[in-house]
Amino acid sequence: METSALPVDPNEMQCSICHELFVEPKILPCGHLLCRQCLLSWLQSQAEAARCPLGRCSIIDEKDRRSGKSVVDIADSFLTDRAMAALVEAHRLLSEQHVCCVCVNVSAVSVCMDCGDTLCQKCTTLHNKQSATKHHAVHKLSSLTTQTLAAKSRSACAVHADTLPVKFCPAHRVSVCLHCATTAHRQCPDVRDVEERRGEARATLRELASTLAAQEAEVARGIGQADDQLTDIDRQTKASIAETDAIFDHLTSVINTHRRQVTGTILKTSSDKKAATQDRKNVLLNHRGKLILHKRFVERSEGVVTRDDVTALTSEMKPFVNGHVGSTSALLTPADVTRRLTVMREQEEMYNVTKALSALITIKDIPIADGDTSGPASFYFHDNHGTNIVLSNNHKTAERKGRGYRNGIVVSRYPIEVNKLYEINNYIGREPLYNLRTGNRVGVSLDSDRQLHLHVNGQDKGVVSPCELPGTCYAIFDVWFEEGKISTLPVTSVI
C-alpha cells in the first residue's frame, strides 16, 4: 500500500542539545525529541528537577522520583521514535556520494528499493530488463526525497536478509519470508500476512491521529475562548475605569485620592483575572503543543508504517500518547471571568459624599459604564438583591430562579432622582398589573414634591405614595413569579 509523504523540515531531524542528526531519538512526555545519549546527559545534569530543554515540561514524574529509578531506566522507558530514526537514516543516505554497486568509480543515478542497490544509468537499464528484477521499484536519486526513501524502505526477513517478509509471527514478534513461515514458524499460532498487520497498524495510527486532531481543535477553541475572555476583561476594565472617571470628574480634589484607589482596585482585579486566564491559556498552549508534537509523531509513523519496527511500535503508541497527553476536556472548562468588575461596593457611601458636597458641586446625570457619555443614563440593579434573583447583562437584567413567592426583590443601584423615569421591561407576567403582558413597560418616578408616580407603557398612572418620600429613595421591583424576568430601560426625563 502506498503511503502519503509527510514533509519533514531538516531542522526537525536535529537534536536540540547536540545539534546533530538524531541518534535513537526518544520521545519526551511533552512530545519533543532528544537523542538517547543526550537525554541521559541532560537527566544526569538536572537531577530530580529535569525538565525538557525546549518546552520546560517535567521529564521525571513523581512516581519515578519515588521509585528511585536510574536515569538509564527513565530514558529507556520513553518510546523511541522509529519513524524519525528512519527519516534520519534516509537523510544520511541521500546526503552521501553514491556510486554504482556494480561498476567501479561510476556515479549512481538510481536506487532499487527492493535490492537496496545503487545503480548507474547503464546498470539501471539492465536492472529494469532482467526478468528477476524488472518488477523492482527503481527510483531516480535526484527525485527521491527523505520521506519517500524512508517510506519505501522495507524490512527484510528476520533470517534471510535478501528476502522481503510476507508473514508475521506474533509469538516471536518477527516478520519472515514465506520459506521461514512454512518451516521454522509452521507450528506458531496466528501467523498472518505482513500487509494485514500493516493495515491494522495504519488504521490504529489514523484513529489516533484523528483523536489528537479533534483534541487539538478543542484546545484551539479553548484558546479562542481565553482570548475572548481577555478581550472582555479589557472591555470591562475600560468600562469600569470610564465609570469611575465619570463619577469622580464631578467631585472635588478632596476625593481624588479615592479615585486613584478605586482605579487601582479595578486594575488589580483586572490584572488578577487576566493573569488567571493567561495562565489557563498558557496551559492550553502547552497542551496544544503536546498534542501537535504527539500528532506529528503519529503522522510520521503512519508515513513509514511499511517499516516493521514502526509497525511493531503501534501497539504501544496509543497508551503512550494517551498517558502523556491526558484528558483535554478537563482543561477546557472556562474560568469564571464574566462577573462584572464592581467599582463601588457601597453606593450609599458614594451618594452621601456627593450629597455632602452638593453646595459646591452640581452632579450631572452621567451614563455609567456604557462606554458612551452621550444620551440617556443607564439604569442598573444593585448587587444587593433577593436570594432567588440572578443578575445578568451587566446588571441590567434580573431573573427569578428559585421557587416560592419571596426573595425576588431587586433594587436600583443608585438613588432615584427627581423627575426621572426608571422603567423595566416585563418579560413574563402571570397576573399582569394594568393587564401588562410580556414586553410591556412599567416604571416609577419621583416628582418635585417627592411624590411617587406609577408609569405603565409610558403613561403616568398617578401618585401611588401615601405621603412625601424621604430624601434618599431607591426604585424597588418584586419579581413575583418563578422564572419571572425583567430588564431595565434607559433613564429618561419626566416633563
Image (cartoon, rainbow, N blue to C red):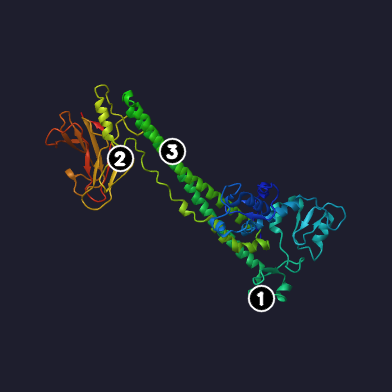
Pick the front one: 346 or 299 = 346
Amino acid type assigned to the residue bearing label 2 in the image: Lys
Image quadrant in which the C terminus is located: top left
**Residue tagged 3:** 271
Q: Residues within 10 Å of mark 1 (few under 14, many from 20)?
A: few
Which percent across, then down, holds residue 60?
57, 54
- Mark 3–mark 1 Cα distance, whole angstroms, equals 67 Å
Q: Secondary structure at mark 3?
A: helix
**Residue tagged 1:** 188
- Mark 2–mark 1 Cα distance, whole angstroms, equals 76 Å
Amino acid type assigned to the residue bearing label 1 in the image: Cys
Mark identifier at residue 86: none
**Residue tagged 2:** 396
Give the side of residue 102 with respect to residue 282, left or right: right
Q: Residue lying farthest bottom?
A: 187
State the image quarter where residue 450 is shown. top left
Q: Secondary structure at mark 2?
A: loop
